[in-house]
Image: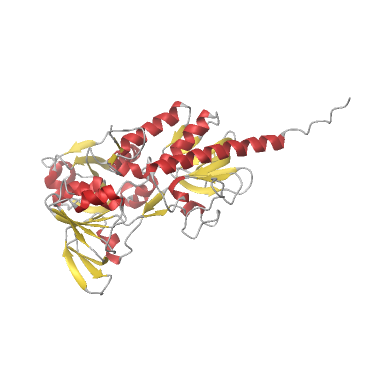
Amino acid sequence: MSTDTTTSVRDVIIVGSGPAGYTAAVYTARANLKPLLIASSVQAGGELMNTTDVENYPGFPEGIMGPDLMDTFQKQAERFGTEILFEDVTELELDGPIKKVTIGTGETFTAKSVIISTGSAYRELGLEDEKRLAGRGISWCATCDGFFFKDQDIAVVGGGDSAMEEALFLTKFAKSVTVVHRRDSLRASKIMQDRALNHEKIKFQWNSAVTGIDGTDKVTALRLTDTVDGTESVLPVTGVFVAIGNDPRVDLVKGKLDLTAEGTIAVDGRSSRTSVAGVFAAGDVIDPTYRQAITASGSGCVAAIDVEHYLASLEDAELPVAEPATV
Amino acid sequence: MSNAKDVTDASFDADVLKSDKPVIVDFWAEWCGPCRMLTPILDDIAAEHAGKVEVVKLNVDDNPATAAQYGITSIPAVYVFKDGKVAATSIGAKPKQVIEKEFAEFLG
């Protein structure tokens, strides 16, 4: 049972605390909208919390650690009066002029507008053995778990920037890192490709799909299938880091907001307006293409300004109609 | 900062395996961001269920033997020990309500 703990209807509630959510908070707080940002209990800060050096966020010529960057975002949002709750949203009621947001404790908050910036979640391989061996050799976070694979042979699955970043990070610990990729070339940016391709500890297993994971209590090998000729092989590894991309986190809004064919929340043109009035979306949850910290930030700014305009339009509608002037 | 007691390779037997109460062990490290997220949640659980269960933490950097013995390859890893044996496990930082559900039988 949820209890309504709201004393008054807020202007805006922001769901999510990555670059999009915090930027929306900075802007709406500076616009004196007193945003409530619900940050999540254990994933606050979003995806950058699991990265190391961020070298492409403008303003940090020497680079900055992902968690440190998110700490600055949070401080900047708080400086202008953002209220932050480290809880998880469990339910959204988005229809009508007053939106309801329920969190894990059962508390409910209400607002005239909501910004959804829930980001994306790691994609899984979708194999039967994956869940069984998660935390027993299978990982989605090199910075968290690389330490446990000192002097071992491990694999990274994927061909994008995050896969290269994981592989390069893991060379600090592992004896060897084999990148397993379905194609014969990488999607990663040129600079990350060059670093990985030239690294003496990193090997590449091209045109290979992971079709099985061996191990009873702990991973012992990956079973691979060649994507060109279908031949099967076994790659003995004790650790597997999965970096095959992300899916937008839309569980909370399924059936409530229109989604695109890619599964992201549909927005109107370059705006953040979703299919429901007063509900805006920003960041990776609307972006199947760019998905960078800086694009998420920009998107959060767009949402904040859209919210300002929306609230202003509500006020205009509430104003009493002026009597025609008589002369 | 966590309120949970630190256990070590040396004290694990006495503090965890020989405990007369179920013990929740938080395997963690300084460099693990999600571990930091989980700390206040486990503190809350410890405070709310004091008497039923004890919550301790083990730094895997300083105590590699215990981490290796239980095959820890991902942290945060939260293990419940009862009567000297692993009774339940939870891998990764999860919301309080989820952990309470997973460990319900030990929290009473």
The answer to which of A285 and B27 lies nearer the viewer is A285
Q: Nearer the viewer, residue A84 or B41?
A: A84
Q: Position of residue A322 (x, y in %)?
A: 79, 31
Vertical side of A164 occupied by A232: above or below:
below
Q: Is residue A92 left or right of residue B83?
A: right
Residue A149 in the image: x percent, y percent? 16, 51
Displayed quadrant of residue A205: bottom left
Q: Is residue A314 visible?
A: yes
Q: Horizontal and vertical percent for residue A285?
A: 45, 50
Percent coordinates x, y for residue A68 in the rendering: 32, 34
Which of the pair A287/A72 is nearer the observer? Answer: A287
User: The C terminus of chain A appears in which quarter of the rendering?
Assistant: top right
Q: How many labels sit on residues?
A: 0
Regarding residue B75, the answer to whether it shows in the image is no
Observer-nearest of A144 and B10 = A144
How is the model colour-coded?
secondary structure
**Residue for point 45% across, 36% down:** A23
Extreme-right residue of the structure: A327
Residue beneath the point at 66% across and 38% down: A314
Residue drawn 11% across and 46% down? B65
Relative to B84, does residue A308 appear above or below in the rendering? above
